[in-house]
Image (spheres, rainbow, N blue to C red):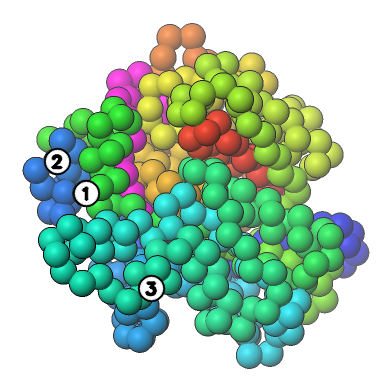
Amino acid sequence: MSVRSAQVAVTGLGLVTAAGVGTDVAWKAVCGAVPLARTVPELAGLAVDIACTVPDFDAVGRLGGPLVRRTDRCCQLILVAAEDAVRDAGLDPGRWDGARVAVVVGSAFGGIGTVAAESAKLAAGKNVSALTIPRFGPNMPAGQLSSLLGVAGPSLTVCTACASGGTALATARGLLLADRCDIVLAGGGDAPVNRLVAASFARMGALSRRCDDPAGASRPFDAERDGFVLAEGAAMLVLERSADAVARGARPLAEFAGDGASADAHHFTSPHPDGAGLERAVSAALAEAGAVPDDVDHVNAHATGTPLGDAAEAVLLGRLFGGRPLITAAKGVLGHAMGASGAIEAALTVRAITEGVVPPVANFRRADDGWDLGFVTGRPRPHRTRLALSNSAGFGGQNAVLAFRPF
């Protein structure tokens, strides 16, 4: 097989989501379009007490008690996703050259659960844990992952709010193309389901208020959307140069063909109303992929279910692509996992390419007036994708767009 050395391949996927641990369970959930939001007892009494959390997550069973005691839940989710991704890629950390392996992790909140819990102790006059700082440090998931798997190359952490997972993957692709490493474990994770974060987002008016109907709360692109559903999760992907992957006998899942980044330069929380910033990121990703808008036939949208955010993205999609590409959005099922979302959705985009199927948008019934877009509804749509985009955006107007094609 002849492979251009400049190609970057995805060779492994690992997901931990509200569907559970594993890529298969996440894929089954989004294809089934059954929302996973529920009432969360820890949020009782708040204005919004619903969220999407990882069920039956056995951190001790997977990572061992000592490691769990010195890590935040965010880190634990990332470590499990990374282990699964490495296994999926058919790699053995005991046999790789750790100096040529890198890790790039994106997170919007880092160890915010530790911050909230230890702050409550301090306010109550109790001693805080001696491990507080190493548990909540934003860089610690990357550091712990490097130690766990013997990764001695670049170990980086990025934060672009809810675009962090996408930014991490783009950064990883750049490391490979610059020959700074041969393998990168990249993705994102967040565990923000706690009273501090939930109360803050509710105060901003960002969360859906459908607490009496958790399953119907997250409504990407739907005309009756009223905010997002807070979620936790992680996704890690293994990236390699395609030639290296083929040489070791791996079967690449997809080509990571391009990436783009931009800033709205508009507002600290609201997106540019016509999606101008996101458009620049899309254009950059297409240029790197050697593609034009007509080549795109599948978009995994950021689509959080907020009135302004979904409208800006829909306007952009219509302007660039018309109604031709199939559009999906995973947050109707999995909720909005903040810095993990871009990595989760990238993994699902790769899975859609390999399966030849585009999942539906859960809870979508009717679009805003004037939107004539190719939303997939009801059931998964069989589809052979030529080029797919995965969009992410975050507070601060930060955007990341990733382009994937079949290998």
Residue 17 placement (x, y as % from top left): 38, 58
Looking at the image, do the residues carrying marks 1 and 2 touch, with CB atoms under 8 Å apart?
yes
Part of the protein shown in magenta:
217-234
Give the quarter of the image for residue 242: bottom right
Q: CA distance from mark 3 to mark 2?
A: 27 Å
The main secondary structure of the magenta stretch is loop
Left or right of 128 on screen, residue 372:
right
Image quarter (top left, top right, bottom left or bottom right) of the C terminus: bottom right
Q: What kind of residue is marked 3?
A: Thr
Q: Amino acid at mark 1?
A: Arg
Report x, y in % for residue 255.
Answer: 73, 55
Name the residue carrying label 1. Answer: 195
Residue at 82% of width from left, 58% of height from top? 177
Q: Which residue is mark 3?
A: 71
Q: Residue 46 got which mark?
A: 2
Q: For residue 225: magenta?
A: yes
Residue 128 appears in the picture as rendered: yes
Q: Is residue 336 above or below residue 185?
A: above
Residue 282: horizontal and vertical position, in percent?
68, 32
Q: Marks 1 and 2, how far apart in space?
A: 8 Å
